[in-house]
Amino acid sequence: MPPVTTLRVVEVVSLGPPDKDNTLLYIWDGVKRVVVRDSKVEKTIPGNDYRTGEKFQLIQPITVHGGSMPKEVLSVEAGPWDDRGRRDFRYFGSKSSRMIRMEQAINEIGPHVVRFRGIDGFWVGVLETSQVPRPVVLSLIGRVDQSNAEERERVVRFLIDAAWYPEAQEEIDRLIRDFPNTELSRRADGARSFITQAQAVQRRSEVDLRRKAQQYKEVARLLKTLQGKEISTELQVEAREIERRDQQQAAADRALAVDLRRLAGRLTSEARGPWQKALVEILKAIDEAPDAVRDRFIAWQKVRDDPKISDEQKFALAISGYIVGQEMALPDLKAAEVFWQAREAARGYLVANEAADRSGQAARLEGLSWPVAQAMADPVYRLELLTRIIQLMPPPRHDPDEPTGKTALHRVLDDENAEPTEYAVRLPPEYHPLRRYPALVVLHSGPGPASAVDEWAAEAARHGYLLIAPQYNVRGLPHDYRYTTSEHAAVELALRDARKRYAIDSDRVFVAGQITGGNMAWDYSLAHPDLFAGAVVISGLPAKYVPIYAPKQQELVPLYCVIGELAPAAGEVVYDRFLKPMILKTWDITYVEYQRRGLEVIPEEVPRAFDWMDRHRRDPYPRSFDVLTARESDDRFFGIVVKEFADGRTTAPEATEVLGQNLRPAEIKMGSSRESNLIRLDVKGVRALDVWLNPQILNFKKPGVPRVTIRVNRKDVISGRRGILKLDLESMLDDLRVRGDREQLYWHRISIR
């Protein structure tokens, strides 16, 4: 095994023990270095595979032998590698107004790294072997002397080291056919056995990944490939045990559905009649996505055999548990009916286009005979119930005919702009609206949303991510990122619309981009830190608002930053001056720097980015934060919404200097105390704001009428009788209708002027 340093944020391979500079770790694999804080490292496993492995030298005649590498490289255009191991390469240097062109050629191939040189221009480069098309590599190493058995065996060892197992197997078969001797056949049998086991281990690892991605059909298919006499006994036993547990669970889910049918059949026709539609939906959910709903029936299952509980009460526990969750399930069919009606009214409110229709649904909700809770105010209990109903129901605008595995194009339904926002979306395999999925907002670098989807689609499918690719460019203008409020609005509207259509886990939403898309991903994530669990920035640079926001907001948004060492100011500015101080603060930042790469697309980082994202979740309700804002669109931070800035506190992008030196941002510091129901705000440069309240920050369950104190700049502006809250259901629903975030719900708004 190569020395794998397993991080809490990412998993990387190192050529040796990581270098350490006090609390920083520098991990080098021959192609890139990764910099993290030592507190992010869980363990280091030693090994030396990256130091060994078969390497093949290629003779590539060159015409320019000497020179020096450029200091900075941008606008890279690299053509495909051909069967000779050559490609066209073009770039702009920072000190040249003309594009520099050359042909490059691979001169060494290893199982993990290839090295190449410029032929008619000076360049010395390295790439991961995976970034050269496999047919090209096979063609190049296939040039060894076919009559030399030792050289042919080297090819087999290379393919095994590269984990190209099908190709290794084919080469072994050809080798034995060409050299039919006993000793070679014996070694070949050992190699075949190793390949079979290595492939089985890969599939076993894929089982865990696909299960985490909620792709249970694929899990079952993979488990069946782990049987057979050629697979190790240990792995077969483990696979059979997993299959046995899965089959037991499937049988239990089928039995759950049968028991529910029987229970419904024992009710009187009068009691059963109103529940036919609901029962069809519930049984379908148990059949299609049992993993998403089985826990909702725990309250019923606990009393299933209790003779003291009537069938009607048991049925009520099952139905109400499905709607509000087993913790709030009630043995009362009338209460269950209220929950069902509340779900229908809530969905009606969220999809209604007209204000009058929404008001009607809100009145319907308020008029329901909600059950009463002990030691809890009625409005608080109703809001708690409605919160659970909303979080457990399918997305309000779910389309059952939405295809998976294809890129769909949507227009934002509630966008009133003259040119409505469009975005592309790709669903993961085995998508179901009752499951919750992580999502990745991918920002294109000019060619459009479909290009961004294509860059990330393969790994998104494996990891079970939903992709959202907004069209943020304004039609008729150059395809670039200009830091404008309209570009921000396009992304926010697309994300909000997608939340209403799809089962997105809003606590696992990330944003990513390469080059200009990376510029935007960095800027947008810092401007809207309450939206994301993290940002992936590949070949993106900090400009305009980013250098001003990052020293505060980057603590709220974990960052995975990738750049080439030849990109403008990569090491000196991006890392040394900008990111290193934040890494030293123990902020969740991983910096990856590629050797001899410029400002360019780095596709090999996509799989590692998903590995990093899989380890992160958003905190939707931080109890304190400190943020800056200097742009009209950057107005919402975890329920604190700026309604009016003071003069001179916002600056248009076109008037903002490259590093934001001329900005005079407003500042908002928030602190809270759940014990005293207090929110403290220290603000500068803000004239008016809204404060949205939620039950995670404040304790609405205290005896008596819910009260809150809001202190702004050390002065109580809401307290005493003014702090008595008149809670209603419509406030929460209206905010949810706009934002679509079912994991970050607010119950009440207070305006401060």
Image: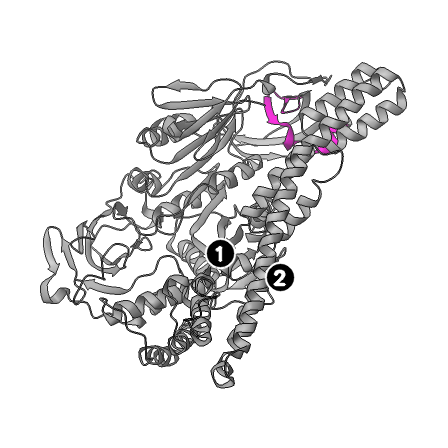
> Which residue sits at x=32%, y=51%?
652
Q: Is residue 42 above or below residue 383?
A: above
Amino acid type at mark 2: Pro
Q: Residues within 10 Å of mark 1 (few under 14, many from 20)?
A: some
Q: Is residue 436 above or below residue 547?
A: below
Q: Mark 2 or 1, which is nearer the eye? A: 1
**Residue 746 drawn at (x, y percent):** 30, 61
**Residue 469 drawn at (x, y percent):** 52, 53
Is 116 magenta? The answer is yes
> Which residue sits at x=63%, y=55%?
405
Let me know if residue 459 appears in the view.
yes
**Residue 730 drawn at (x, y percent):** 31, 72
Residues 744 and 558: in front is 744
Segment colored magenta: 111-138
Q: Is residue 334 above or below residue 329?
A: below
Rendered-image quadrant of the C terminus = bottom left
The residue that label 1 is drawn on is 436
Q: Residue furthest front?
A: 307
Q: Disc number at residue 117?
A: none
**Residue 338 drawn at (x, y percent):** 38, 77
> Which residue sits at x=9%, y=63%?
720
Q: Secondary structure at mark 2?
A: loop
* Colouring mode (rainbow / by chain / secondary structure / one colour): one colour
Q: Is residue 716 above or below residue 123?
A: below
Rendered-image quadrant of the N terminus = top right
Is 710 magenta? The answer is no
Q: Disc number at residue 403?
A: 2
Residues 63 and 606: in front is 606
